Image: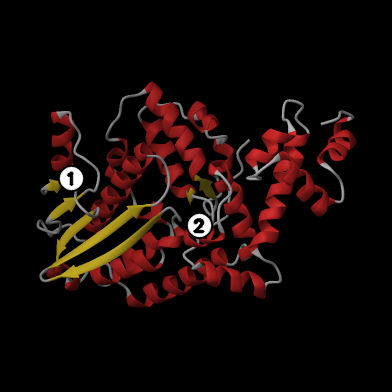
Amino acid sequence: MQKLVNHPSLGWVSVRHLQHLVARAESVGVAMEDFLAEGGLSKAQLTDSNALIPISAIEAMLAAYTRKYSDPLLGLGLANDIQPATFGVIGYISQACTTLADVLDVVTRYNGLLSNIGKTTVVHEPGLVHVNWVCLAGSDALKRQLTEYVIGSFAVLMRTLLPEQKNLIKAVHFAHSRASNADTARAYLSFFKCPVYFDKPATGIVTPSSMLKIRLHHGDSFLKDLLDQHAQNLLKQREHVFLLPDEVKQLVSAMMVDGVPTKDAVAQQLGLSGRSLHRKLQELGTGYREILDQVRIEIATSKLKEEAESGSRIAEHLGFSSHQAFWRWYKQVTGKTPGEHRKEMTGRNL
């Protein structure tokens, strides 16, 4: 069964979003147990509102859903009845903000409480503000649905906070292409109630700059300060749950599917330079090579238990130039040859 994760170097989203998906689907008669099972999850696992869901689980669920239903606007549909509570503490702070400018500041600062697969930015230009979001993980199909869910949720949240502002959203931009079906294409206009453009350089909502200063009806600066401190504490806790070596190890394990990742490639995923990653690991008493060796040993040990795996195939998977190079490295690291270790574990020779 899939475990809920709390690891920032692997893609995850807040369980609150999956709770919203399940509740909405079941309200229209969709049984979610099978779809959750496709992602290695159960409804019982969704009760902890602070849990995180691996993006791999969401990907598997979307694939299963797509096989059964044709719903090109799933993301927008989920955003349509989004509630501030779905955003957790970010939603509550937004309701206590005194202006839309404060709301945008909250959303960008505490983006890491909702997921690590996307990034929110606010870009100002004369008379306009672009609230942009980019999805950094998942397949193209998943990115499209997640992007439309997030942008749709931004729009609903903004209209909830400023319901009387009819020109609140001037335009919506999507980096992906327009749907080929005419009815589907028109649904975007119906949802956003403004021009929607596709194949744009960035995805986001465009709002007049003047909207940022309008006072929100339920603003409460004292409550906002209290919730803001709470959000800061939550973010610090999340950022310090894992040490950097653990993050690097998990990331290397995930990237090994496509070949042995370089230190620079891993550093880029963590938002660091290769040199900075080297220095930080060194300060913690380890290094990239040591972590890579740990991952390789774990993978090699697992594969040595499988009778069908030959030494040559294991060597190739782990990025060694030859069977002999893998053999020498394995004995140097473990004190035993791969053959000796397999015989120890299984009673069979390599």
Tell me the SS state at disc 1. loop
Tell me the SS state at disc 2. helix
Disc on res. 106: none
Q: Residue at x 16, y 35 (%)?
A: 185
Please state the horizontal and vertical placement of residue 260, each as a whole percent of the image.
58, 48
Please state the horizontal and vertical placement of residue 124, each as a whole percent of the image.
19, 70
Q: Viewer-proximal residue, 256 or 51?
A: 256
C-alpha separation, residue under disc 1 versus residue under disc 2? 31 Å
- Residue identifier under label 1: 198
- Residue identifier under label 2: 265
Q: Residues within 10 Å of mark 1 (few under 14, many from 20)?
A: some
Q: Amino acid at mark 1?
A: Phe
Along the horizontal axis of the image, is 74 left or right of 340? Answer: left
Label total for image: 2
For the C terminus, give its image quadrant: top right
Q: Residue at x 15, y 56 (%)?
A: 169
For the N terminus, give its image quadrant: top right
Q: Residue at x 30, y 29 (%)?
A: 71
